[in-house]
Image (cartoon, rainbow, N blue to C red):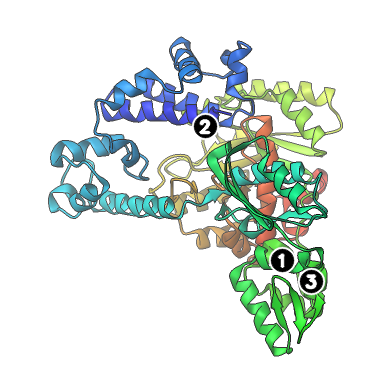
Amino acid sequence: MKNSEIADVLDGIADVLEFEGDNVFKINAYRKVARRIREIPEDIEQLYQSGQLSKIPGIGKNIAEHIEEYLKTGSISKYRELLSRVPSTFVEMMKIPNLGPKTLKLLYEHFKIQTIEDLKNVLEKPEAINLPGMGEKKIQNIKNGIQLYLTKRTHQRISLGIALPVVDEIVKYMKQVCKDISPCGSLRRMKETIGDIDILCTADNKDKVVKRFISYPGVQSIIAEGETKSSIIVKDHMLQIDLRVVEPESYGAALQYFTGSKEHNIKLRTIAKEKGLKISEYGVFKGEDRIAGKSEEEIYKIFGMPLIPPELREDRGEIEAAIAGKLPHIIKYDDVKGDFHIHTNYSDGISTIEEIVKKAIEMGYQFIGLCDHSQTSKFAGGLNVERLRERNKEIDRIARKYPQIKIFKAAEVDILGNGEMDYPDEILAELDFVIGSIHQGFKKNVTERMIKAMENRYVDIIGHPTGRLISSREGYEVDIDKVIEYAAKTGTALEINAYYDRLDLNDVNAMKAKEKNVMIAIGTDAHNIKMMEYMTLGVAVARRAWLEKSRLLNCYDWKKMPVKRNK
């Protein structure tokens, strides 16, 4: 799929146009279409070939021609022309969080910067602080953005939401020739970003396994082809995937070892040493005798523990809890009965209400929450009161057609600059539940605004509470500990937003919420039906946070949900 490639180019066009001070509506049009293209589940090339590009909202004649040109030639002449008018290094510099094309232009005009190093030097100059719209706080935010950008570029970690589908497809493809097979490392622990991608397997015929692996249809290039380890680059996001083939008697030990984490394994080795044993990727040994290794269950059993779920293996007390018989019964991936946060085509979603309902039924859900944006979020097609009521009437009509599922009339309502909600209380009262979210003013009294929102009896959930985007934004200036404290006080739930670039609350903050007895609601923030499958990522965060079913609203029967309005 070339969706991401085309979206990147359209965003690049918008960046340069903004740098040049072009028409804001034209800039926003490019950005909106880029976001839509990233979100659609279909292959844009197939949509083009079948004459359905118009299915993507916002694609006019001009942008359609750009897409056609890219699909035919691999580039867009408009973008090449724009790039010729700015320094070549600006393409990368415009990816720096907190900088932005307008600020970059300001610094370029005053200091003629050309590189990131120039930018870092200029930010130390007193003259930079006094430029229009700058100031000490803005300077510090840009410095933080540079650090974040350079760190990500150096470590080159991959989002879980990008890596997981690719690896799942390869594992499915390889099962034909493998006895046992599983991903390892941070991916198996379901961390939000992934370093190396390793797959472990056993097989009767190693040559057959290797040949099938390097013949995977998505292979871009073969890096290594060996009897026990092979490596490929796949076309999807140019990811490197390593396959290790091990002996069946060592599979469990190797799976435990290569899953990690490093800290978890060190703790396990220490326990082994105290017992006069040795543990490695080949098994658990007493002297020269291997006494365990075929399965992970027998590895942990040797040390007096039940199997510790991979998501918990971070040396956060899981080994001590396992030895004491106090491991929590964490939520399972199939425990979820519904999704609290889905956008329809009434606001900025692509899918219709009926399409969403059909997908939810297919996923085995008992309920869904349709949470279109409120009126202030004009950039996201926010609904005025009349349009909201029109949507609710359609929900009633669809609900009569599909009585086997509860369709909540909900909304993602903006928390305004003064902490008030974007709809008056009499409108909020018409909804089944409300997600209160901040979409602007990320540095303006965020904590206080969230607290005021939580004091409103109709606000049931706080959406994406820290506002971070893993790939590009640190998030709001918010005291999350204080937000958690007030959520507990007011009975407001906090969201784990399952969109792969948010995963917000993260596992650490979700664990803090658990300790304060705060309820959690997982929402995919889906803008099309394919995105509803991100629920897996949200459940992974909950599992990493040691959350049990009793703390997750998604696991309750919709009639018995312990929500704020029922108290």
Write the residue at 51% across / 52% down: 157
Q: Is disc 1 in contact with disc 2, using a CB cutoff of under 8 Å?
A: no
**Residue highlighted by disc 1:** 254
Q: Nearer the viewer, residue 235 or 363?
A: 235
Q: Secondary structure at mark 2?
A: helix
Question: Do labels 2 and 3 touch, CB within 8 Å?
Answer: no
Q: CA distance from mark 1 to mark 2?
A: 35 Å
Of marks 1 and 2, the one in the foreground: 1
Identified by mark 2, the residue type is Ser
Percent across and percent down for residue 79 are: 36, 23
Residue 41, horizontal then vertical, whole percent: 64, 29
Q: Nearer the viewer, mark 2 or mark 3?
A: 3
Left or right for 523, reference 110:
right
Q: Which residue is mark 3?
A: 293
Q: Percent x, y for residue 300?
A: 78, 74
Q: Position of residue 235 (x, y in %)?
A: 57, 36
Residue type, label 3: Gly
